[in-house]
Image (cartoon, rainbow, N blue to C red):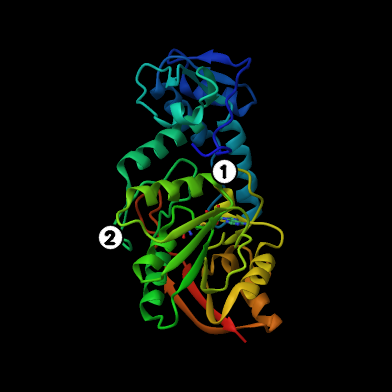
Amino acid sequence: MTPNLHRPEPILRHTARPVDRSVPPQAAAARLRDGETLLVTDLYTTGEAILARLDALLRPPPHDAPFDARQAHRRAHRAAVLRLLAPIEDHRLALADACPIGFLDELYPDHASFVLPFAQVQELFGAWNRYKEGVHLKVLGHSLFPFYGTYVPTRVTHLELFGTWLHQYKGPRDRAIDVGTGCGVLALMLCRAGVQRVLATDINPNAVESVSRELGRLSPRPPIDLFCGDLLGPDPAPADLIVFNPPWIRGEAEGLLDEALYFTGDLFGRFFDQAFDRLAADGRVVLVFSNILELVQPDVPHPILAELARGRLRLVQKLSRRVEPSAAPDGTRRRTRERVEIWELARA
Ligand SMILES: C[S@@+](CC[C@H](N)C(=O)[O-])C[C@H]1O[C@@H](n2cnc3c(N)ncnc32)[C@H](O)[C@@H]1O
């Protein structure tokens, strides 16, 4: 196991009150909402029922409410959810109806018995299933087996659009950098398109571990090198293609996967500085982006337009495709103005 992998922090001491199916889920949920910490002691389904009631108690604002209001709700909801705990004994979830979660052995070599927030156990369980069963990605024609804590795309329109762009790209393909590789999907697409060598980077060690395991599984092994760290990494070698599917929304990263979704500070400024230094003379910077930023945060300056205004890179082309509307809880399709985009930039 790679050292320093992210994992839910084990709780070794706590004063949580026990709760089981004899307590009405509604009452337990209200206690969590009011700040109490509870430990599920009998069944996985008890924990699920309590969290379902908590969701009903802490209803989110409407989906068209201001972004800040939705963020504030998200934070309060998460804090209450994390007050429900689950026991781990001997690397097993100590609840009668629990299924195995292999990551518990792997991520906690230093502790056998402890407690974790129930929601994080659910996340570990979901991640374990994805890791064992794989996630089929049509753009690759095969499944990936993402490691715990790795961003996996749930929608694919942006990947398909990147595939369309890659198909019509006629330039050099000796070396590419996939910045923020996540589960490695863009790096693998680049290899399939004949790029000779790809450097895949990510600030999240779990993502780098994930792609490293993927490379060990694939035969022949794709020509991907890995770097765990910020943006393009220290290697000054020029690249024909510098690809980045960045976080699309400005916000503070609080959870493990938030760095995949929210950007802070000057992430884009730093990215463009590095990309400009490393881009081969006839190379391309390719950003997978979305108009979601303009839709939900119209006051935030557009980071790609801001770079273009500096004049050192020019827009070669921009592809755009409508995103399939997601299903609302009642099964109807929500109308969306969201579009995904491919921005192809070259030296001015
Ligand atoms: C939206 S996800 C894209 C993942 C993958 N490339 C894809 O298309 O599915 C953004 C990724 O960028 C990574 N990331 C965020 N900030 C980063 C940084 N400063 N340096 C390197 N990677 C970063 C995140 O950890 C995450 O894996």
Circle 1: residue type: Leu
The residue where tag 1 is placed is 256
State the separation of the CA atoms marked 2 and 1.
28 Å
Residue 235 or residue 343, whichever sits in front: 235
* Within-10-Å neighbours for mark 1: few <14, some 14–19, many 20+: some
Whether the residues at callouts 2 and 1 have beta carbons within 8 Å, the answer is: no
Residue 242 at what x, y percent from top left?
Answer: 53, 70
Q: Position of residue 310 (x, y in %)?
A: 71, 81
Residue 302 in view here: no
Query: At 39% across and 30% down in the image, what residue appears?
Result: 102
At horizontal 63% and vertical 38% (from top left) the residue drawn is 76
For mark 1, give the secondary structure.
Answer: loop
- In this rendering, the answer to whether 130 lies above or below 243 is above
Residue 299 tag number: none
Question: Percent from the top left, x then y, of residue 23?
Answer: 47, 15
Q: Residue at x 37, y 81 (%)?
A: 168
Q: Residue furthest left?
A: 141
On screen, residue 287 versus residue 215, left or right, reads right
Q: Which of the four quarters of the rendered structure image does ligand 1 lie in? A: bottom right
Q: Earlier in the sequence, mark 2 or mark 1?
A: 2
| Disc assigned to residue 141 | 2
